[in-house]
Amino acid sequence: MIAAYNAQDADLYVSYMTDEACEANYRGAVVREGKEGTRSGLKAAFAKWPQNTAHVVSEEVTDNYVVFREHVTRGPASDGSDLVEPFDVLAVYSFEGDKCSRVEFIR
């Protein structure tokens, strides 16, 4: 999923997700709902930040969960908005079988 994200391939990224998957803030609001919501949200983000990448700093795997500490660099925005400073985020990926059903971000 990270390789697909860094290639800015939203279609490949969501191919690893269940149809009902979502991305959300940790214990908070869903920011991208369902496979299609995730796809369209990522495509919009990739269009705004064409140099956006996430590098895995560390990982923990247990049962149906993968936790990555990711270092994210956005680069200049295509719409001329202010530069976003690079940041770290913990991303908790929940799996149902071999598909991701939820990603929660702790920032």
Image (cartoon, rainbow, N blue to C red):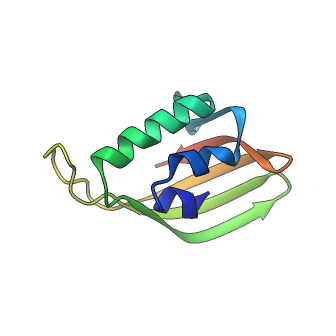
**Foreground of the two, 90 or 100:** 100
Quadrant assignment, res 90: bottom right
Residue 8 in picture, x, y percent from top left: 45, 55
Say if 11 sits above or below 89 in the image.
Answer: above
Q: Look at 65% across and 68% down and name the residue there.
A: 59
Count of labels in the image: 0
Q: Look at 60% across and 71% down and name the residue there.
A: 58
Tell me if 20 is positioned left or right of 25 in this view.
right
Residue 19 in picture, x, y percent from top left: 71, 31
Residue 76 in picture, x, y percent from top left: 21, 57
Q: Look at 41% across and 62% down and name the residue there.
A: 53
**Foreground of the two, 2 or 103:** 2
Q: Look at 68% across and 49% down and name the residue there.
A: 93
Tell me if 46 is positioned left or right of 23 in this view.
left
Residue 69 in picture, x, y percent from top left: 55, 63
**Foreground of the two, 58 or 36:** 36
Say if 99 sits above or below 8 in the image.
Answer: above
Quadrant of image for the N terminus: bottom right
**Foreground of the two, 77 or 73:** 77
